[in-house]
Image (cartoon, grey):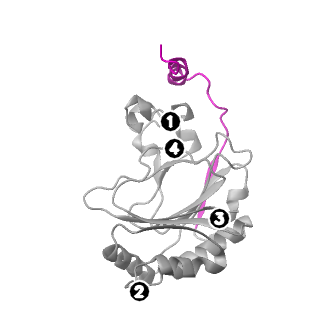
């Protein structure tokens, strides 16, 4: 008999349910909205940022030059511009490195960090296609181009169904959420802080989210920042 069967059965039947916590989202057009992530009942703070046209063109230029571009580094605010600039294609000319350096500085200041783990990735398919929570304290996510991150509100998700992809069913058939109307989507340009399960006191309260589906040649440029100490 499969030793995992009793555990799987309990999950399907809804037993061993996690304690439900009240969580809410906060969004606004001012960068100050990001500080709301420190509020205990907030698991996503989203700054609705409009990308200036020169930066938008700069991003598209990078995707044209290097459609499979990807980089990751651990950096300090002081070295972020240099690190990103060196990783970008030699024939790239644009303002992306400056913008990323400003975001790194803001992220480290907000959380009193000396370093941040940075990933910048060009995508033509979903990187994390299933709804999940991150086992980190908090992650910054921003999509420079293309479809942006999708997420579920606390009241719109059945957490007992998380991690049940092994059943071979899509998220929509697992009962993880009631309908497609429950899925919320960030906008390209938004800078969001996603509170994870490792934030103190946030177990079973991490934001449930996934990468968007990319089809028909669609492309995406994604930046994420994590705590680096």
Q: Secondary structure at mark 1?
A: loop
Foreground: disc 3 or disc 4: 4
**Considering only order in the chain, which callout, 3 or 2, is on the residue closer to the N terminus?**
3
Neighbor class of circle 3 (other Cα within 10 Å; few <14, some 14-19, many 20+) is many
Q: In the rendered structure, which segment of residues is drawn in magenta?
A: 1-28
Tell me the residue that label 3 is attached to. 34
Q: Nearer the viewer, mark 2 or mark 3?
A: 2
Would residue 101 be counted in the magenta stretch?
A: no
Residue 4 in the magenta stretch? The answer is: yes
The Cα–Cα distance between marks 3 and 4, rounded to whole angstroms, is: 22 Å
The residues bearing labels 1 and 4 have C-alpha atoms spaced at a distance of: 7 Å
Query: Where does the image place residue 206, in percent across and percent down from the top left?
Result: 62, 46
Q: Which residue is mark 4?
A: 132
How many numbered marks have been drawn onto this rendered protein structure?
4
Q: Say which residue label 1 marks.
A: 163
Looking at this view, is 48 or 196 the one in front? 196
Q: Is residue 178 above or below residue 133?
A: above
Tag 2 secondary structure:
loop
């Amino acid at each position: 008999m499969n030793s995992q069967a009793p555990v799987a059965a309990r999950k399907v039947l809804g037993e061993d349910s996690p304690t439900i916590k009240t969580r809410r989202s906060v969004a606004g057009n001012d960068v100050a909205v990001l500080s709301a992530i420190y509020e205990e009942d907030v698991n996503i703070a989203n700054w609705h940022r409009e990308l200036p046209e020169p930066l938008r063109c700069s991003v598209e230029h990078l995707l044209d030059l290097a459609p499979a571009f990807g980089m990751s580094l651990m950096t300090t605010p002081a070295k972020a511009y240099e690190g990103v600039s060196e990783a970008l294609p030699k024939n790239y000319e644009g303002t992306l490195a400056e913008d990323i350096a400003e975001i790194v500085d803001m992220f480290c200041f907000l959380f009193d960090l000396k370093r941040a783990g940075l990933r910048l990735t060009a995508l033509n398919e979903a990187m994390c296609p299933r709804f999940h929570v991150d086992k980190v304290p908090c992650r910054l996510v921003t999509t420079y181009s293309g479809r942006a991150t999708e997420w579920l509100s606390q009241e719109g998700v059945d957490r007992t169904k998380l991690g049940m992809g092994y059943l071979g069913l899509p998220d929509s058939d697992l009962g993880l959420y009631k309908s497609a109307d429950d899925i919320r989507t960030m906008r390209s340009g938004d800078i969001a802080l996603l509170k994870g399960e490792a934030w103190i006191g946030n177990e079973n309260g991490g934001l449930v989210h996934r990468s968007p589906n990319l089809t028909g040649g669609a492309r995406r440029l994604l930046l994420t920042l994590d705590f680096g100490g």
